[in-house]
Image (spheres, rainbow, N blue to C red):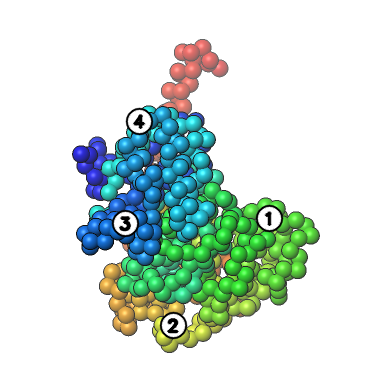
C-alpha cells in the first residue's frame, strides 16, 4: 500500500504539495491553465469528499446503524456530503485504467452535485470529457491524489493546505489572469489582522476563490473564537471562479451565501439588503468600462457622492462597499496606488467627500511584487463607520484622524519576481494600527510580544515614526489636497549617526572614487587594445 502523504516532505525532500503539483503538471499538455486548474482541484475535492464520506460511513457501522448507510440525512447532519457508489474515490480508482475514465469522473462530479444542494453550481461540468485528457497521465494523477489522507490528522487541514498551494501555483502560472481568483495569502492575513473579524457578517463583493473568507475563519480559530459567530456573504461574476469559491468553502465545511449564480455586483447585487460588519475585498485593479455612459447614473449606492467614472471602477467599488457597511462596520480592501491621489473625472471629489465624512481610518502603502498579477506596489484602504471611543474593545476616540503607514520597504523576495510579507511584518503593521486605536493586543504587538495574546496590559503605546507611520488630522489631509499617499505624511526615516566625522567620511569616499576612476582608465586601455587586435582600431 502506498504511504499516505500527510507529511510535509515527500520524495527528494520536496513537500508533498510540490510532488502532487509536478505529477499534475505532466497531465496538462495543451490544456490552458485557466481551465486545467478546475480539473485538478475538482479531483482533490472529490478525494476529500470521499474520505469524509467513508469516515462517516464507518462511524455509522461502528454504532450499529447499518440501515442508515444510504440515507443522505445521516451524512449532512455531520456536514458530510453524501456520495453514491459511482461518485466515490474507490470506484474512480478501480476504473482508473479504463478508457472511459474521463466520462466516469464527469459522472461522479455531476452526481455529487445533484445529491448535495450545498454544491449547486460548484463543480466543473463535463470538463474531463471535453478537454480530451491523456488517459494514462490522468490515471497517474489519480494514483498520486490517492496518497493524500485528507482526514486522519484532525489538527492539520491537509486538503485545505493542498488547495491553497494549488491556487497560488495556478495564479503564478497564469500571471495577470490569476488575479481574477487569487489574492496572496499574506495580504489577506494582513487585512484580517487589521479588521479582526471575530463575529458578525463578513462580505466580499468580488470574492474570487474565497480566500478572504478562508483566512477570516482561520483568524477566528487562531484567536480562540467561535466560527459560528460569523456569517459569510459574497458574490463573484466569473462562472469558473464562482465554482472555485464554492469548492474552497466546501472542503473546509464553511457555510457561505455566494448568491444563486455568478453575477456582476454592480448590475445584479444578490445581497441588496445586507449591512455587513466587515467588508474584505481585492477588486480588479482599474477595471475599464464597467458600465456604459448612461447606466447606473441614479444608483442609490452613489447617494451623496458624484457618479463614479465609467472608465475606471475603483471608486465604484469603494462606494459600493461603503453602502454595505453597518453603523459600526469596517472595511479593508486592496486597490491600485492611483486610487490614493487621482483627480480624474469625479474621483478626486468622491475621495474628498469620503475623507470629510471621516470614513478613512488607515491607509497602508505596500511594497511591489506581492501580487502575481502585477509587479507594481498597491495600497490597502481601511474605512470605519465609527471612529468614536469604544470602551468594550478599549478603542480610543480617533474621530478626525487617519493613520498612515508606509510599508513599501517591508517584505522579502522569495524568488526573482515575487515578494512575501513575513509574520513579523504583518505583526508590526497590524500592531501599529491597533496600538494607534488603543487596544491592548496592538500595544503588545508593537512591543514585540506577538504570541502572548495579552489583553489589558499596557506594554506599549503608539508613537509616530518618521518614514513608517503618522497619525494625521483632517486639516493635515486638507493641506495635501486630500491625497492619501502615506509617503506624503510619514516623511523620511532618520539616518543613524555612525559616529564617523564628516571630514573623515568624505576623505574615504573621495579615495574610493579616485581608485575606481583609475581602474576605469586601465580598463579603457585594455578594451582599446583588444579592439585593435580585432581590426577595429581608430
| Tags 3 and 2 touching, CB below 8 Å | no
**10 Å crowding of disc 1: few (<14), some (14-19), many (20+):** some
Instruction: Pick the quarter of the image with the N terminus.
Output: top left
Task: Decide which of 18, 390 is in the foreground and name it.
Answer: 18
The residue wearing badge 4 is 97
Q: Is residue 502 left or right of residue 309?
A: left
Which residue is depicted at the point 73% across and 63% down? 296
> What is the CA distance from the residue labelled 4 to the residue labelled 1?
48 Å
The residue wearing badge 3 is 69
Percent from the top left, x then y, of residue 445? 34, 71
Task: Decide which of 291, 124 is in the foreground and name it.
Answer: 124
Q: Quadrant of residue 105?
A: top left
**10 Å crowding of disc 4: few (<14), some (14-19), many (20+):** some
Q: Which mark is residue 395?
A: 2
Nearer to us of marks 4 and 1 is 4
For marks 2 and 1 on the same chain, the one whose residue lies earlier in the sequence: 1
Secondary structure of the residue carrying tag 2 is loop
Percent from the top left, x then y, of residue 536? 53, 15
Nearer to us of marks 2 and 1 is 1
Q: Is residue 493 visible?
A: no
**10 Å crowding of disc 3: few (<14), some (14-19), many (20+):** some
Secondary structure of the residue carrying tag 3 is loop
For marks 1 and 3 on the same chain, the one whose residue lies earlier in the sequence: 3
> What is the CA distance from the residue labelled 2 to the residue labelled 1?
38 Å
| Tags 4 and 2 touching, CB below 8 Å | no
Amino acid at each position: 500500500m502506498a504511504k499516505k502523504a500527510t507529511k510535509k516532505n515527500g520524495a527528494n525532500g520536496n513537500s508533498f504539495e510540490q510532488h502532487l503539483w509536478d505529477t499534475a503538471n505532466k497531465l496538462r499538455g495543451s490544456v490552458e491553465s485557466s481551465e486545467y486548474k478546475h480539473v485538478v482541484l475538482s479531483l482533490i475535492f472529490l478525494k476529500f469528499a470521499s474520505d469524509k464520506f467513508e469516515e462517516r460511513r464507518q462511524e455509522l457501522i461502528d454504532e450499529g446503524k447499518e440501515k442508515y448507510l444510504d440515507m443522505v440525512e445521516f451524512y449532512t447532519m455531520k456536514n458530510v456530503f453524501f456520495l453514491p457508489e459511482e461518485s466515490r474515490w474507490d470506484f474512480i480508482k478501480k476504473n482508473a485504467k479504463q478508457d472511459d475514465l474521463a466520462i466516469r469522473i464527469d459522472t461522479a462530479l455531476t452526481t455529487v452535485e445533484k445529491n448535495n444542494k450545498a454544491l449547486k453550481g460548484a463543480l466543473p461540468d463535463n470538463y474531463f470529457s471535453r478537454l480530451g485528457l491523456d488517459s494514462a497521465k490522468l490515471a497517474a494523477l489519480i494514483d498520486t491524489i490517492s496518497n493524500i489522507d485528507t482526514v486522519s490528522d484532525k489538527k492539520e487541514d491537509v486538503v485545505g493546505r493542498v488547495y491553497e498551494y494549488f491556487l497560488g501555483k495556478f495564479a503564478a502560472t497564469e500571471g495577470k489572469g490569476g488575479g481574477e481568483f487569487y489574492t496572496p495569502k499574506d495580504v489577506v492575513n494582513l487585512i484580517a489582522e487589521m479588521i479582526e473579524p471575530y463575529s458578525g457578517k463578513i462580505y466580499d463583493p468580488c470574492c474570487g476563490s474565497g480566500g478572504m473568507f478562508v483566512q477570516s475563519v482561520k483568524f477566528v480559530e487562531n484567536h480562540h473564537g467561535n466560527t459560528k459567530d460569523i456569517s459569510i456573504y459574497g458574490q463573484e461574476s466569473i462562472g469558473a471562479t464562482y465554482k472555485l469559491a464554492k469548492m474552497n468553502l466546501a472542503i473546509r465545511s464553511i457555510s457561505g451565501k455566494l448568491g444563486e449564480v455568478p453575477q456582476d455586483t454592480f448590475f445584479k447585487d444578490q445581497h441588496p439588503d445586507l449591512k455587513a460588519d466587515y467588508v474584505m475585498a481585492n477588486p480588479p485593479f482599474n477595471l475599464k468600462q464597467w458600465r456604459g455612459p448612461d447606466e447606473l447614473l441614479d444608483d442609490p449606492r452613489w447617494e451623496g457622492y458624484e457618479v463614479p467614472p465609467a472608465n475606471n471602477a475603483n471608486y465604484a467599488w469603494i462606494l459600493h462597499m461603503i453602502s454595505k457597511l453597518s453603523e459600526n462596520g469596517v472595511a479593508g480592501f486592496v486597490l491600485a496606488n492611483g486610487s490614493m491621489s487621482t483627480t480624474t473625472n469625479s474621483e478626486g471629489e468622491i475621495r474628498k467627500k469620503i475623507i470629510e465624512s471621516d470614513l478613512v481610518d488607515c491607509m497602508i502603502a505596500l511594497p511591489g511584487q506581492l501580487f502575481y498579477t502585477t509587479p507594481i506596489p498597491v495600497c490597502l484602504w481601511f474605512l470605519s463607520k465609527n471612529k468614536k471611543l469604544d470602551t468594550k474593545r478599549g478603542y480610543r476616540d480617533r474621530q478626525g484622524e487617519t493613520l498612515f503607514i508606509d510599508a513599501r520597504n517591508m517584505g522579502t523576495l522569495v524568488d526573482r519576481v515575487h515578494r512575501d510579507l513575513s509574520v513579523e511584518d504583518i505583526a508590526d503593521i497590524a500592531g501599529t494600527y491597533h496600538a494607534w486605536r488603543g487596544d491592548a493586543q496592538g500595544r503588545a504587538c508593537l512591543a514585540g510580544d506577538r504570541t502572548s495574546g495579552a489583553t489589558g496590559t499596557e506594554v506599549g503605546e503608539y508613537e509616530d515614526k518618521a518614514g513608517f507611520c503618522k497619525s494625521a488630522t483632517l486639516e493635515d489631509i486638507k493641506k495635501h489636497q486630500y491625497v492619501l499617499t502615506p509617503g506624503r505624511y510619514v516623511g523620511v526615516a532618520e539616518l543613524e549617526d555612525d559616529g564617523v566625522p564628516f571630514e573623515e567620511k568624505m576623505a574615504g569616499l573621495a579615495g574610493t572614487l579616485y581608485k575606481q576612476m583609475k581602474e576605469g582608465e586601465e580598463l579603457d586601455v585594455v578594451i582599446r587594445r583588444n579592439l585593435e587586435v580585432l581590426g577595429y582600431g581608430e
